[in-house]
Structure formats: C-alpha cells, structure tokens
Image: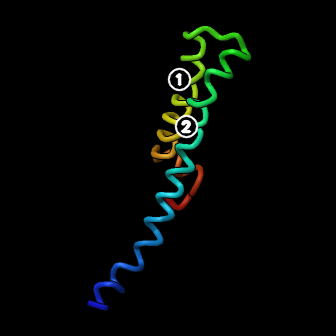
Amino acid sequence: MTQRVSERGPWLPAVLVCVVLNMLDGFDVLVISIVSPLISAEWHLTGQQLGELLSAGVTGMVLGSVGCCDKEMNSVIDPRV
C-alpha cells in the first residue's frame, strides 16, 4: 500500500501545476466575457463590433497555438528542435 502512495506522488505536483496554468490561461476569456457589457457601453459598440472584438481574442489564441505547434516556428524559438 505504501508503495502505491509513493508512486502516486511524483505526478501529482505536475498535474496541479498544469491545472493552475490552465486556469490562468482561461482567465482572460472569463474576464472579457464579464466586462464586455461595460466595454460595449463605454466605447458605444454595436453587437457586431463587440463580437468582432471578442473574436479577435480567440483568433489570437488560435494563431498563437498554431505558432507553438509549427515545427519551423519551434526551431526559431529553440534551435535544438
């Protein structure tokens, strides 16, 4: 039984770090969805303009993730790849 507990230990901190990083990564989407009515009122945006603004953030996330997965881009960041 103690061997099983010790086997469980090494990966648990790694999983917790991943969970916390994932929460921080999604925080910007959460915040923008909460403050979007305030932004819309302050900047006098229509519904379409607000949608384009929110879509720009998601598009940036997509392009960033593609850049991270692109082998040529990774070789620029880390030549060992």
Query: Circle 1 sits in a helix, a strand or a loop, which is it?
Result: helix
Query: Circle 2 sits in a helix, a strand or a loop, which is it?
Result: helix
Numbered circle sitting on residue 30: 2
- Please say if 54 is above or below 8: above
What residue sits 60% from the left and 36% below the top? 31
Question: Which coloring applies here?
Answer: rainbow
From the viewer's perspective, tell me whether residue 4 is left or right of residue 42: left
In the rendered image, residue 32, in percent from the top left (x then y), is placed at 60, 31
- Please say if 39 is above or below 63: above
From the viewer's perspective, tell me whether residue 51 is left or right of residue 1: right
Q: Earlier in the sequence, mark 2 or mark 1?
A: 2
The amino acid sitting under disc 2 is: Leu
What residue sits 56% from the left and 32% below the top? 60
Residue toward you, 21 or 79: 21
Numbered circle sitting on residue 55: 1
Residue toward you, 1 or 81: 1
What residue sits 47% from the left and 58% below the top? 19
Residue toward you, 57 or 80: 57
When asked about the image quadrant of residue 15, the answer is bottom left
In the rendered image, residue 53, in percent from the top left (x then y), is placed at 60, 20
Mark 2 Cα within 10 Å, few/some/many (few <14, many 20+)? Answer: few
Name the quadrant of the N terminus.
bottom left
In the rendered image, residue 76, in percent from the top left (x then y), is placed at 58, 49
Mark 1 Cα within 10 Å, few/some/many (few <14, many 20+)? Answer: few
The amino acid sitting under disc 1 is: Ser
Residue reaching furthest to the left:
1
Observer-side mark, 2 or 1, equals 2
Numbered circle sitting on residue 64: none
